[in-house]
Amino acid sequence: MRTYGLTQLEKLAIALAVAAVLAILIPLYRQLVDIKRTADCLSNLKDIATAINLYQLDYSNTLPLAYYANPDGSPQTDAAGRPLTWVLCISSYMRRDLQRALACPADPTGGSTVITHPRDSNRTLRLSYGFYAPLSAARLEDLPNPGLSVLIADSLAGGQLGSLNPNPLLGGNDGFVLGYDDGTLRPTDSTRYITRLSVWRRRAEGDWTPDNLRSVHGKGVNVLHADGHVATRAPSLMILTRDSQGKLEPPWTLPEPRKRNDTENQP
């Protein structure tokens, strides 16, 4: 009895066709997943922006504290040894579930910074976003470019060598509050770049370059600006640049003294 079936050549052709289809569909699926996660992350930042805006209405247009500090500038911690952060300032203004709003869906760690839940001391929250420390408690009118200044961004609790620290802000260069390569609070004349903003790898043979700066999103770093709008920025924004006068260029801004009008000096 003669049987009919696929020849070896036909089977090979089908296998190659399936492999070709998968080679197209898998990257497309990953791209769609990244688009969805990026959108959800931006939605988180919009909710945070709304809470910060409400906070400012009650506190004279002042931004929240990046973290609560001791007299010597070191971060305060609670009874469990966890840092007291900007989340405490805005938690009562948040409408959504805090854990959903504070954890980026693309963060592979699920939120590398662990803090105590501000509404239940028996629970913890995982945080995926870092607050730009120099803008802690700054007034918007003191910022030269609030619409161009990054306030909160995707961040991992890792230092410049990529180590993860479950107790951020303690032990040197690890933490989620954004800092500099040579300091944690403010830049110096020798500061070269921003640290702790979703940095994934560092070339062993050299310094930071734009093409080795990584973020948890394929197209860049999701950021909330000081004026409240959100956007996805290129990872290269982590590099610190200065103008000819030595001032930080956007998107990094430092509060500056308010310029007094000449009429204010008149009796």
Image (spheres, rainbow, N blue to C red):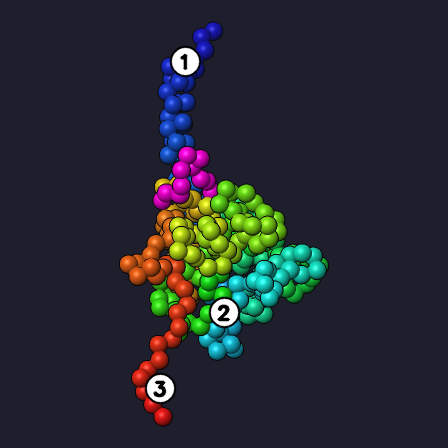
Left or right of 81 on screen, residue 132? left
Q: Is residue 104 visible?
A: no
Local secondary structure at mark 3: helix
Q: Distance between the residues labelled 2 and 3?
A: 25 Å
Residue 123, horizontal then vertical, whole percent: 68, 58
Cα gap from disc 1 to disc 3, whole angstroms: 90 Å
According to the picture, the residue beneath numbered tag 3 turns out to be 264
Residue 8 badge: 1
Label 1 or label 3, whichever lies nearer to me, is 3
Tell me which residue sits at (35%, 86%) in the image. Answer: 264
Q: What residue type is labelled 3?
A: Glu
Q: Looking at this view, is 49 or 172 the one in front?
A: 172
Question: Would you say 93 lies left or right of 252 here?
Answer: right
Residue 23 is left or right of residue 94, and the answer is left
Q: Give the range drawn in magenta.
A: 200-210
- The residues tagged by marks 1 and 2 sit, at their Cα atoms, a distance apart of 71 Å
Q: Within 10 angstroms of label 1, few (less than 14), some, or many (20 or more) residues? A: few
Q: In this view, does 13 lie to the left or right of 68?
A: left
Pick whichever of labels 2 and 3 is earlier in the sequence: 2
Q: Please, which residue is most extreme toward the front here?
A: 189
Q: Is residue 118 magenta?
A: no
